[in-house]
Amino acid sequence: MKNDFNCNFRDKTLLWLAAIIIAQHLLFLAFFPPILEPDSVSYISLGRQLADTFSFESGRRLPGYPALLALCYGLFGQSQMPVVIFQHLLGLAIYFMFLPLVPGRRAKIFFSSFVFCDILFTSYQHALLPETVFAFLLCAAGFEFRNYATTGKGLHLLLCGTLLAAGTFMKPVLKLFPFLILLLLLAGRRTTRQKLAASALFLCVPLLSVWAWSYNNYRHKGVFALLPFESVHYVGRFVTHLEFPEGSFARRAFLDKIAAFPPSMPIEAQRRLAASVIAELKQEKNLNDGEINAEFVRIAKLSMLRHPFIYAKETLIEAFYFFFSAHNLYAKYALKDRLLFSVKDGLRNRQYLSVLLKVGVSLHPLYWLMFLLAVYFTVCNWRAIISGSNPLLNYAYAAIFYITALSCLVNEGLSRYRMPLQPFMILMATLALERLFARKIQLNFSGRLKDEG
């Protein structure tokens, strides 16, 4: 198959598809104001604080996305539109980054069609949230990892580590991911000396940046950690099954609040309860984020040890929501009065027409199809995947496994947190669909896919 890496826009069909995708982004910019989700408020506040005072004070956010907001505010004023324009440009950059890797005209049409239909991903580019920037950094790091594997040039590995470090400061979920990529480096075919040199080059920026920010937190907050407070997510889904260590200062606050709720407390209520306990402990006991975080970690560890099956069940439920839920922001706001909060609630209340509307505008079947095609691709190519012959796909599988596992283990199995993985999922779904329509595809080391003769 010739020109696998050339995106031939002399093909009118591909040119039209690219133009339609660009037009879709322009329509979002023309007809929808920037979307503000609950988390957007804290990012905007920190961005304005950074722009006005050049200071950053937060125990639950990292400075990456607020710094981007501050830069936009400094250049363009307080309008949010420049931020979402930049995010839409990043979304298009991801599309044009992946498209040349897709083999053949038909597969490129499949890929472009998936990208166009994935309104969930596009809608998050219109929100004041770090998901799009994080997705771009994660994907760009994957391409630099692939470039290192194919060229052996250390600069690509240094750039890969730098992009992952930047991604970590957008979303802290990535802080341990470089060590998983390190395993891929050590499993490569180079000499031991080359592997050690590559590992040092790759890890230097992520480790130094995380250490520097942790030390900054130690100086100002007395806690040597990337984030002084992140454990609220550990307990926010199963507060009715919490176990408290001996002498826990949070025990009474939790038990008093739990008693006011029914045993089958909704998930959102559980998370609000945990947040209210934090506020109470800060006010009444004058505790800082680090002290409350350490206590929540102790509670979470004991609770998981005493209720492993409950925690495993909740984690699997989160994994289901992570891959199969859809939460298109344009639909959420445009159809706010007619759209169900969840399909489960609609089925329980026999609101079948509302369920169909929810499924239709949220495109649930599309994401089910993508997942099944990605699984099919994995099953069909497991030997090539295990052999490590395609570095970009190995990086993609590492990212999918890692981000899925951490998101679900800390009870954050939302479609929003799947967004950075969507480009990889679409690539796999495209290759699976091409396999169904063409001859068997074989992976080779360069990262291309070729038809077997």
Image: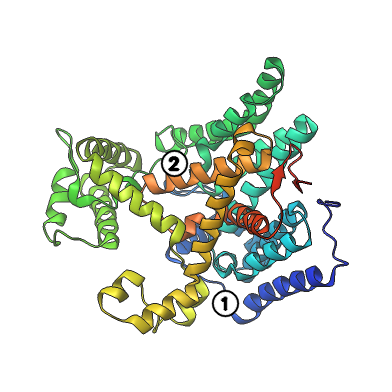
| Residue 132 in sight | yes
Graded by Cα atoms within 10 Å as few (under 14), some (14 to 19) or many (20 or more), the crowding at tag 1 reads: few
Viewer-side residue, 108 vs 128: 108
Viewer-side residue, 177 vs 100: 100
Q: Please determine whether, in this image, residue 278 is positioned above or below residue 308.
A: below
Residue 404 in picture, x, y percent from top left: 46, 47
Which quadrant holds residue 438? bottom right
Residue 117 in picture, x, y percent from top left: 60, 70
Per the rendering, the mark at residue 340 is none
Graded by Cα atoms within 10 Å as few (under 14), some (14 to 19) or many (20 or more), the crowding at tag 2 reads: many
Residue 248 in picture, x, y percent from top left: 17, 37
Q: In the orientation shown, which residue stands out farthest toward the top?
A: 193
Q: Mark 2 points at which residue?
A: 227
Give the residue at x 75% y 69%. 18
Which quadrant holds residue 80? bottom right
Give the residue at x 66% y 30%. 202
Disc 1 marks a residue whose amino acid type is Pro
Give the residue at x 60% y 67%. 122
Viewer-side residue, 336 vs 278: 336
Residue 258 appears left or right of 10: left
Viewer-side residue, 104 vs 56: 104
How many marks on residues? Answer: 2
Give the residue at x 74% y 71%. 17
Q: Is mark 1 on a helix, strand or loop?
A: loop
Residues at marks 2 and 1, CA–CA distance in whole angstroms:
32 Å
Q: Is mark 2 on a helix, strand or loop?
A: loop
Which quadrant holds residue 25? bottom right
Residue 290 appears left or right of 307: right
Disc 2 marks a residue whose amino acid type is Leu
Residue 432 appears left or right of 249: right
Q: Name the residue under label 1.
A: 33
